[in-house]
Amino acid sequence: MAIRNIILEGDPMLRKKSKPVRQVNDHIRETMQDMVETMRQHEGVGLAAPQVGVMRRMFVAEPVPDEVYYMINPEILEQDGSQTGEEGCLSVPDLEGVVERPQHIKIRALDLDGNEQSYDFEDFHARVMCHEYDHLDGVLYIDKATETYDPQERYEELQKEYEEKNKELRKKLEEDGAISVEE
Ligand SMILES: [Zn+2]
């Protein structure tokens, strides 16, 4: 297995529609294993083939640790409900955004053995699958996000808020005599 390079937003490859996989062979399996390794290296929860310059309709996903899905020629058969949550993308580093996605999807894909599988996903699983699926059509989450921000900046803002709140809390605790100092 090998770590692949991840293409970043701005490269036209990320905006193209990928072509179906014609045959699930060793080359495809090896590519997908590399994709898993690359995704893990970057602490991602999903990676689509076009992100590593392979313009084929396939992606890997690991919405929870050690639960890896290999999706080849996936098709979303059903989608319903809606959920709003935060997303990031390995092709758009240092950014997060708020995206609306279906609450539930039914998706069909070939697995690494070339067998057809269908899955029902909800919540975060559904979100990850939809995000990766979009990559196969040249769509990035930032196209759909209602808001994008730098998580580092948001973290710094939050730290300031916590600091202010802690000052108030500390004062209150001291007034109540709730703080005891162990020597
Ligand atoms: Zn992505």
Image (cartoon, rainbow, N blue to C red):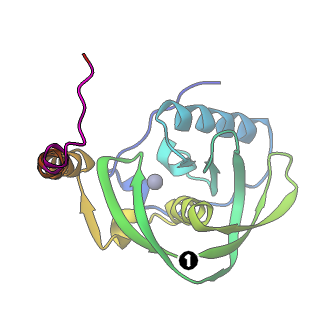
Q: Which residue is at 46% across, 34% downward?
A: 42
Quadrant assignment for the N terminus:
top right
Q: Which residue is at 74% across, 38% downward?
A: 29
User: Can residue 140 be seen in this snapshot?
Assistant: no
In the picture, measured across the screen, residue 65 lies left or right of residue 158, that is: right
**Secondary structure of residue under mark 1:** loop
Q: Which residue is at 30% across, 74% downward?
A: 146
In the picture, measured across the screen, residue 4 lies left or right of residue 171, that is: right
User: Is 180 within the magenta?
Assistant: yes
* Image position, residue 93 (x, y; %): 33, 45
Bin the neighbour count of mark 1 within 10 Å (Cα to Cα): few under 14, some 14-19, many 20 and up. Answer: some
**Amino acid type assigned to the residue bearing label 1 in the image:** Pro
User: Is 146 within the magenta?
Assistant: no
Q: Which residue is at 59% across, 24% downward?
A: 2
* Image position, residue 128 (x, y; %): 56, 59
* Image position, residue 87 (x, y; %): 41, 58
In front here: 86 or 10?
A: 86
Range drawn in magenta: 172-182
User: Seen from this angle, which residue lies furthest front?
Assistant: 177
